[in-house]
Amino acid sequence: MDVDTGLNEQAIVNQKEDILIVDDTPENLRLLSSFLVKEGYNVRKALTGQMALTAMDTVLPDLILLDIMMPAMDGYQVCEKLKSNPKTTEIPVIFLSALNDAFDKVKAFAVGGADYITKPFQFEEVLARVRIQLSLKTAKLQNKKLNAELEARVKERTYQLQVVIEELKREIQERKLLQTKLLNMALHDSLTGLPNRAFFMERLVELLKVAQENTDYQFAVLFLDCDRFKVINDSLGHLVGDELLIALTHRLKSILSLDNTIARFGGDEFAILLPEIDNINTAIQVADRILKALSFPFQLQRNEVFINASIGVALGNYSYEQAEHILRDADTAMYRAKILGKGQYHVFDPAMHAAAMQALQIENDLRKAIQQEEFLVHYQPIISLITGKITGFEALVRWQHPTKGIIPPGLFIPLAEETGLINSIGKLVLSKACHQIQQWYQDKLTNESICMSVNISARQFAQLDIVEQIDQIVTETQINPENLKLEITESAFINNAQSAKAILQELRQRKIQLSIDDFGTGYSSLSYLHNFPVDTLKVDRSFVSKLDGTSESLGLIPAIKKIAETMKMTVVAEGIETEKQLAQLRELNCEFGQGYFFAKPLPEKDATELLVASPRW
Ligand code: C2E
Ligand code: CA
Ligand code: CA
């Protein structure tokens, strides 16, 4: 209860209460009145019922003492009238009756009387009954007021509550919006607005579930990776790269149907999900369509850019246990597409997975092999076709695998190139080969000047410190740099002509010789030969193996020999296996030869013996 209500209560108590006495006997009126006035009440008087009702028009009394027996309108009638009027209905009425009157108590209460007093009056009784009625009335009033207050407060509280509820509702709504936004962000790529990997995986899991329940159901995953995207990013900048990715997204969307899920996996990788397809051909058609669409240039704000992509396709069906595996297979197929020449698609077949697993195994083994120095170098002699004597050796690496025995380089060099492990292996071979030739010189096993040829892979050649690495080994082994010849394939120059030229010039200054390996099989853009200081062209074995004694079988060899003569280079013919081939190459004045006809690549000991034996062919 608040202070305000307390004050009101006080007011009610302090106020003089107003009593109306209605009686047709003036004597009674006077008696009662003077007594009640003395008791501190305000008293008004009425001689008839009508007068009493009229008195109601001015001030309402707090209590009415009403005589029953009156002429014209008796007490009952007056009381009924008072009770039927809402204005006066709450005023308590105490009937006054004489003992000899035919007083009907039941009727008195029935018409709304609160109590009755019989005459002659006993003042204590009058006072007691008056007080009771007045305090009852006050209590009622207070009660009513309290109820009203309570009601008002309930209303107020209800209103406040409603406001709070509304606020809460709004907040919940806002939260929901935020949540969907966050969820959206978590499942979408911000650059292209495409679904991301998480979203894609959810969808993939769903489809796999469908397929697992229905063995006829098939779907496909296309894994797309842009070729050369890094070149664009590096040369034109990331903003153009981003612009291209957005344009690519638009193009993909324009050629794919709405029920295909396209997702960006980050970088230049995209995945496409084709639900419910009849067979793999549907997926192949889509891959074809994408590649065709990419054959047109992208018109960006400032640049016109071409971009190709490699696509891996995997068919999803009930046989898969996990969604990730389908994605993995599509990825493997994409990777294969890249190896096969980029700008194409490749469909996954399980053998590829086995091959990929094997590659991974070999990679692990290779890392261990480097730590444990499991590499050997074999040496194959190179013969002067003019003197018929050994003029040098080519160092060829072998992997002495702890369980698989000797593994030829063809089985691990490509992987070593791909993983960068070739750098360590190459350095090791260079070091061993240099040590070997220095040993031969020290042991004075030869009177002639012999040369050691060492293969340097394109990746190895692209290392920033390749010249320092070579310098270090030359210094360490104290070989004469003129006795070292590096064999490099054309691809090492073509990809980075500027720096290749600089490196070759540095090597030339050190008098290290240079040979182009597998000549005739690569780009053979003859123009670069002018620019690079090269000593020797190694005619690839594929040309030599065709030689059968006839002039038609000579193929490109005479032309290569001509080029070499013009450029003042010598020629080494690789892979000589027969007497006939040797004769034909001698006929062409080819300076050097190498091949099984003379000797296979030999272990250190055998090579040393051969050198000592100094055979002549
Ligand atoms: P390559 O540089 O063209 O080496 C010549 C390959 O032809 C060697 O194979 C050699 O054994 C083989 N060969 C030589 N004469 C004949 C012949 O008369 N008939 C036939 N059928 N083959 C002949 P190998 O040793 O298996 O090496 C294969 C390739 O591995 C090499 O081709 C080279 O590209 C690479 N390689 C070998 N050792 C190294 C190395 O230390 N570093 C790098 N980067 N690559 C290496
Ligand atoms: Ca070689
Ligand atoms: Ca070769």
Image: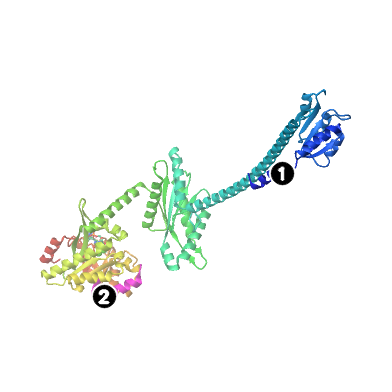
In space, the residues marked 1 and 2 are separated at their CA atoms by: 124 Å
- The image quadrant in which ligand 2 is located: bottom left
Residue 286 visible:
yes
Q: Circle 1 — which element?
A: helix
Task: Tell me the residue that label 1 is attached to.
Answer: 14
Q: Residues within 10 Å of mark 2 (few under 14, many from 20)?
A: some
Please state which of residues 561 and 194 is positioned toward the viewer in this rendering.
194
Q: Amino acid at mark 2?
A: Arg
Please provide percent x and percent y for residue 319.
39, 41
Please state which of residues 154 and 209 is positioned toward the viewer in this rendering.
154
Q: Is the CB atom of the residue marked by disc 1 within 8 angstroms of ligand 1's nearest atom?
A: no
Magenta-drawn stretch contains 508: yes
At a point 59% along the width and 49% down the height, the residue shown is 167
Residue positioned most to the right: 72
Task: Name which of mark 1 and mark 2 comes first in the sequence.
Answer: 1
Query: Magenta residues?
Result: 495-514
Residue 482 in which image quadrant: bottom left
Q: Is the CB atom of the residue marked by disc 2 within 8 angstroms of ligand 2's nearest atom?
A: no
Residue positioned most to the bottom: 509
Residue 48 in which image quadrant: top right
Above/below status of 477 relative to 112: below
Q: How is the image coloured?
A: rainbow
Magenta segment's dominant SS is helix
Please provide percent x and percent y for residue 16.
75, 42
Magenta-drawn stretch contains 330: no
Residue 584 in which image quadrant: bottom left
Q: Circle 2 — which element?
A: helix
Residue 588 visible:
no
Q: Which mark is residue 508?
A: 2
Q: Amino acid at mark 1?
A: Asn
Please state which of residues 458 and 245 is positioned toward the viewer in this rendering.
245
